Image (cartoon, rainbow, N blue to C red):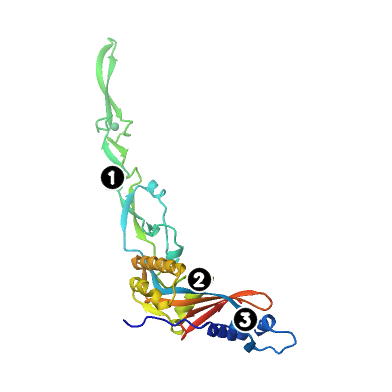
Amino acid sequence: MPDVRIKTPNLDDIFEKWKQKASRTDHKKMEKQFGTKGAIFSLDAISAAEYVKDTLKEAAIYFAVKKTLGPTPKGKDENIVTAPKLGREQFYSFKGSGKVNKENWKEKEIVPMFESIQAVPCNSCKGKGFIENKCKTCSGTGIIKETLTVLVGEDLKKEKRPFSYPCNACYGSGNRSELCKECEGHKNLYKYENLPVPFQTVVTGLPVLHSSAQTKYEKEIGDDLQQVLDDVEGIKFSDFKELESKVEASLGYMNKNIKKTVSSARSDHKNYDKDKDTQITTPIYLFPLIQMFCETKKGSKFEIYSLGSANKFMIYSNF
Ligand SMILES: [Zn+2]
Ligand SMILES: [Zn+2]
């Protein structure tokens, strides 16, 4: 089995690298915090032995994922309703408003689309809104027939005489129009489609960093690793099973927090693996993470972190 051991950077080297960087960034502050009155300020006089009060050996685990947010799977279904029911549906429109960022979208992904509304002539009434039936009052004749008893002549002889007049129920047409129950008299039914919201396809790279040190630099470290993974040396693993079995041998140390970090990174990795929108794009990297607690001559406290091996490491500090 090849040696999986990674050499942790030496504390003096970490401190030296921090010192150079800090003096490049803010020389005045260095002078103020570490200088001695009356003496010429020199970086050489600032040593780790004097200012580093405590050190923790921790670890960080990194991998990157690619998140693809895109259109929802194709879906389409149709509804046919009466005109008043159309008003009770919530319609959406995206015409001319561009594609939608899925991350901001809180509504359903398939929605009734305003532009899809189409009038469909009612089948039951052939688009008339009513159905014509024979008038029941006049049996479809349009005429109401009566017999009048008429007294004829001096004798007042009773005679039956037919008399007819137009039916008032159908205005003499013989037909009566009844409301079509299908379209409720609106002549048309309305068809509309439930369609997917037009999402833009967004692909984002996402750094995932788990660290066993309590550091506020997790996000920054993750972002940096995404940019300059070559500038820092760690050990690559293709899966967590391998990482878990070799983590202690690789680092040369172990603690409870590192154990916890490995297991939370592992479940995170598993979730990304399962998520259909994400794809894990890198191996899993294990980095030594050294946390140094320092205090200046003036008594101000700060921390220095190193991430990586003795060959290649990056530093972070809140100095
Ligand atoms: Zn109808
Ligand atoms: Zn009639």
Residue at 65% across, 85% down: 27
- Residue that label 3 marks: 50
Quadrant placement of the C terminus: bottom right
Vertical relation: 312 (above or below) 166: below
Assign ligand 2 to one image quadrant: top left
Name the amino acid, label 2. Ala
Badge 3 marks a residue whose secondary structure is helix
Cα gap from disc 2 to disc 3, whole angstroms: 23 Å
Real-space CA distance between mark 1 and mark 3, rounded to the nearest whole angstrom:
97 Å
Q: Quadrant of the N terminus?
A: bottom left
The front one of 126 and 27 is: 27
How many other residues sit within 10 Å of disc 2, few (<14), some (14-19) or many (≥20)?
many
Pick whichever of labels 2 and 3 is earlier in the sequence. Answer: 3
Q: Amino acid at mark 1?
A: Cys
Q: Residues within 10 Å of mark 3 (few under 14, many from 20)?
A: few
Image location (x, y in percent) of residue 44: 62, 89
Which of pointers 1 and 3 lies earlier in the amino acid sequence?
A: 3
The image quarter in which residue 194 lies: bottom left
Secondary element at image label 2: loop
Which residue is disc 2 drawn over? 213
Cβ of mark 1 under 8 A from ligand 1: yes
CB under 8 Å between callouts 1 and 2? no
